[in-house]
Amino acid sequence: MNPPNNPPIQTNLPARMPQLRVMPMPTDANIHGDVFGGWIMAQVDIAGAIPATRRTNGRVATIAVNSFLFKQPVFVGDLLSFYADVVRVGRTSITIYVEVYAERNRLEADTVKVTEATLTYVATDDNRKPRVIPDIASL
Ligand SMILES: CC(C)(COP(=O)(O)OP(=O)(O)OC[C@H]1O[C@@H](n2cnc3c(N)ncnc32)[C@H](O)[C@@H]1OP(=O)(O)O)[C@@H](O)C(=O)NCCC(=O)NCCS
């Protein structure tokens, strides 16, 4: 429920919980003043690791960035929402699809999809070696 003194929420964001929400600062910009792609990649990696860790019930390491599309620029002050979903579970690896939306000018109605990526993580044990992902029924 929206608390009585908060403005109503009018959002074009997907109707599910993002894994991560974060706002890039001026220190995250490239030489042109837009947000540095490497900073966005780091946030995507963090967001993707959240469902990967949850599904594998333990630590994971990123083994591959399978695809990465910077569809729209990201600006300092955009409010970014990262949505991440499991798309494939292998023996020791798990593949996650991440979508990123920017609320421009901090207005939920002015929302654009800026980035999409697919990453693969490997479930690892305490010795950093691959471990078998548990069956979902056992979680
Ligand atoms: C992750 C790591 C432990 C995996 O060890 P490994 O001996 O290379 O793993 P394997 O060859 O047994 O492959 C493990 C899984 O990754 C998959 N995999 C390997 N290479 C891949 C690639 N290029 N793309 C996608 N998946 C890949 C394999 O298919 C296997 O999945 P499966 O068990 O579901 O079939 C090791 O590669 C590593 O430590 N890498 C560095 C990780 C890192 O530092 N990441 C950045 C910071 S988190």
Image (tube, rainbow, N blue to C red):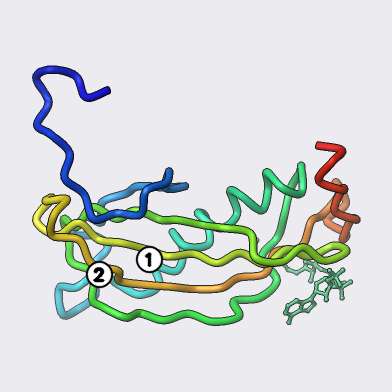
Q: Is residue 29 above or below residue 55?
A: below
For the residue carrying disc 1, how many other residues have a C-alpha within 10 Å: few (<14), some (14-19), or many (20+)? some
Seen from the viewer's position, the closer of residues 24 and 66 is 66
Q: Quadrant of residue 82?
A: bottom left
Residue 114 on image: x %, y %: 30, 71
Looking at the image, do the residues carrying marks 1 and 2 touch, with CB atoms under 8 Å apart?
A: yes
Furthest residue in direction top, as rendered: 4
Q: Is residue 48 left or right of residue 54?
A: left
Q: In x, y percent, where is residue 139?
A: 80, 37
Residue lying at 58% horizontally and 48% vertically, measured from the top left? 50
| Pointer 1 residue | 39
Left or right: residue 70 versus residue 64 is: left
- Residue 76 % position (x, y): 17, 61
**Residue drawn 61% across and 50% down?**
51
Judged from the image, the quadrant occupied by ligand 1 is bottom right
User: The N terminus lies in which quarter of the figure?
Assistant: top left
Q: Residue at x 88, y 64 (%)?
A: 91
SS assignment at label 2: loop
Which residue in the structure is indicated by mark 2?
35
| 92 vs 65: above or below | above
